[in-house]
Image (cartoon, coloured by chain):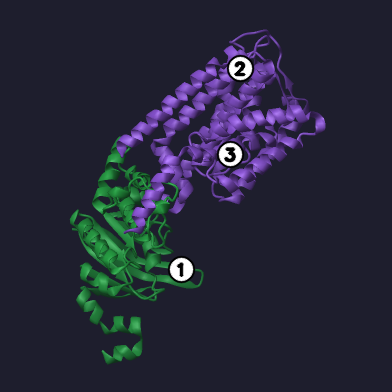
Chain colours: A purple, B green
Amino acid sequence: MDKNFAARRRRDLIVAGALATLAALAPLFVKDVYVQNILILTLMYAALSQSWNILSGYCGQISLGHALYFGIGAYTTELLFTKFGVLPWFGMLAGGGIAALIAMGLGYPFFRLRGHYFVIATIVIAEIGLLLFQNWEWAGAAMGITIPVRGDSWLKFQFLRSKLPYFYFALGLCCLAWFVTWWLEDSKWGFWWRAVKDNPEAAESLGVVVFNSKMGAAAVSAFLVAVGGAFYAQFLAYIDPESVMGFQFSLLMALPAVLGGIGTLWGPVLGAAILIPMTELTRSYIGGSGRGVDLIVYGALIVAISLALPQGLVSLFSRAKAKNQVKNQVKGATR
Amino acid sequence: MTALLETRGVWQRFGGLVANSDVSISVGRGEIVGLIGPNGAGKSTLFNLIAGVLPPTQGSIWFDGEDVTNLPAAERCQRGVGRTFQVVKSFETMTVIDNVIVGALVRNTVMREARGKAHEVLEFTGLAARADVLASDLVPAEKRRLEVARALATEPKLLLLDEVLTGLTPTEAQTGVALVRKVRDAGITVLMVEHVMEIVMPLVDRAIVLDLGKVLVEGKPADVVRDPKVIKAYLGDRHAVGA
């Protein structure tokens, strides 16, 4: 049993390494800038969804307000860069830190809420954040911030001629988010989170400090999402409240995980790999007829998934496990 | 030697309802104590007070020589109070072994050790063959045993069992009784709430009967079952007069 477990962990790591290597080689074959763009966004959303999955999937605290942390990462980086000349690399970490602190500050009152009430609170808070930034003159208000162009430089994390550096950063971030999840999955925190999700009262009776568990999950999740936001700001070279803090980001972090398998290691990556290219393609083919079409596609997908595969797409890959379960049920029935 | 667990004048009121009034009980080290009484006697409330789910309205709770009245449940678990729930609360999306690992993490911070401890406990409770099954796929009797296994993995000094034997078939109940004895033989003190008298009485060293939130009688099981007050509480006046 232990051997199986260790083997599975090792297999996950090897598969991830192989996929990352394949992805790293992709630019050799993909020269089209439009396609490269889609790859970058896919990797970024995979990373974001993986981070969202830590709080909402593993720990079970469904957040639809993660756009707030995304925006905080973007704004912290760009405000520090444009106002104080702080390099984006430091801004990124600062943004992550601030987002983690805010997540814990918000968690203090909100983790007392359960289920739908918690979800509603996260939506409301993210909307308040959006409104604050839309009216904050010093931070550019609704006009946003244009990031001054200083030429290609790793130091300033700015590239005009090629998208490849962004691609590799997004890939790195995705690997980091995946690895953090992989590592946490077999740690005290990972077990505590899953216990809190399944039954907080029982968890508490087994020595799990439920409140601290939620706080920890919120902090890690917000930190990684904010780093993603910092990346996105550099990638766009222009930010305004709606384009880094809009509700659609909260949705686009949640949906890949839901589609692929919420609370699973591979769900977010798998979900993002399907959902994001599809979104981008529908958007460009159906084009100007409005932003709503991609949302219709999500809606249809989610309905289809919840009807056919309520555990998400990853459940397709665990056929062996399903077989095992049938065997066990037979065993159970003969007792 | 001081008692392992002591409640001193514990009261619990829910609005106008008094669930426990002036309950003082003590449980000595190595004992199996049964907490019995008719429905609504306040057994579950007292249990929750001891486990730290809520603080008592009045009175104090002492565990292992320390006042734990205001400690939350998680902290009491760390001090050595393990419990099961009357309505089973398995972590349904986790496997049996993972359920037990959550408990084992209280005293083992290294994952490998926690996993080892969990396997040991599954072996002890007879669930080893089911380690990799999802908790939601267990049959009811196995779920009860998983509750016990999880609590044992926290390496408690005192194990609180809330109706673990109720609703089982006679064979299952006998396996359960054997397990409780085995737990006691491993040096763990047991306080159990139970409904079914004929199962509890041969098992426990001492029985405490609660009625209407108060301690009615306490003593050796054989004496307790013959006590007119107990018969009256369970069956009504007419039978008590007959006894």
- The nearer-to-camera label among 2 and 3 is 3
Within the image, what quadrant is residue B35 found in?
A: bottom left
Residue beneath disc 2: A166
Q: Is residue A319 left or right of residue B149?
A: right
> What is the CA distance from the residue labelled 2 to the residue labelled 1?
62 Å
Q: Is residue B33 left or right of residue A174?
A: left
Give the answer, above or below, for where B239 lies relative to A154. below
The answer to whether residue A23 shows anywhere in this view is yes
Q: Nearer the viewer, residue A265 or A229?
A: A265
Label 3 secondary element:
helix
Q: Nearer the viewer, residue A271 or B6?
A: A271
Give the answer, above or below, for where A324 lies relative to A77. below
Badge 3: chain ID: A
> What is the CA distance from the residue labelled 2 to the residue labelled 3?
26 Å
Badge 2 and badge 1 in a common chain: no
Q: Position of residue A316 (x, y in %)?
A: 50, 39
At 37% from the left and 68% from the top, the residue drawn is B43
Residue beneath disc 1: B13
Residue beneath disc 3: A259
> What is the CA distance from the residue labelled 1 to the residue labelled 3?
47 Å
